[in-house]
């Protein structure tokens, strides 16, 4: 299972890196409209994949955070430890 988790993290990072490259190319404004549209379509696919990975990770974190046998939601950006 650890391999599957690290694979998901690797996939997320790979998708995010590709998405960043697409954004840079599109911001340059040097591509044709056709290429920009293809990049936009690919970018939207990558955004969905990244979002799904984050939702899955959040669900996993919520499952792992248990107190007294009951699931307890904890904000990931809180300063509590």
Image (tube, rainbow, N blue to C red):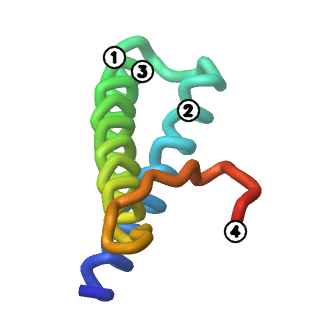
Labels 3 & 1 near each other (Cβ < 8 A): yes
Instruction: Give the numbered dot on residue 36.
Output: 3
Label 3 neighbour load within 10 Å: few <14, some 14-19, many 20+? some
Gap in angstroms between the C-alphas marked 3 and 1: 5 Å
Label 2 neighbour load within 10 Å: few <14, some 14-19, many 20+? some
Residue at mark 2: 23
Chain-order first, disc 3 or disc 2 = 2
Residue at mark 1: 34
Q: Can residue 12 be seen in this view?
A: yes
Q: Of helix, strand and loop, which one carries label 2?
A: helix
Query: Looking at the picture, how far across and down is residue 18, in whole percent?
Result: 46, 49
Query: Looking at the picture, how far across and down is residue 49, in whole percent?
Result: 30, 45
Query: Looking at the picture, how far across and down is residue 11, in whole percent?
Result: 35, 64
Quadrant of the image containing the N terminus: bottom left
Q: Is residue 10 visible?
A: no
Q: Of helix, strand and loop, which one carries label 1?
A: helix
> Could you say which is closer to the camera, residue 32 or residue 12?
12
Chain-order first, disc 1 or disc 4 = 1
């Amino acid at each position: 299972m650890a391999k599957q988790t690290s694979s998901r993290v690797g996939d997320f990072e790979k998708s995010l890196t590709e998405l960043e490259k697409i954004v840079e190319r599109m911001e340059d404004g040097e591509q044709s409209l056709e290429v920009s549209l293809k990049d936009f379509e690919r970018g939207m696919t990558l955004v969905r994949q990244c979002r799904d990975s984050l939702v899955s990770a959040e669900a996993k974190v919520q499952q792992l955070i248990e107190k007294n046998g009951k699931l307890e939601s904890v904000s990931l950006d809180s300063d509590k430890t």
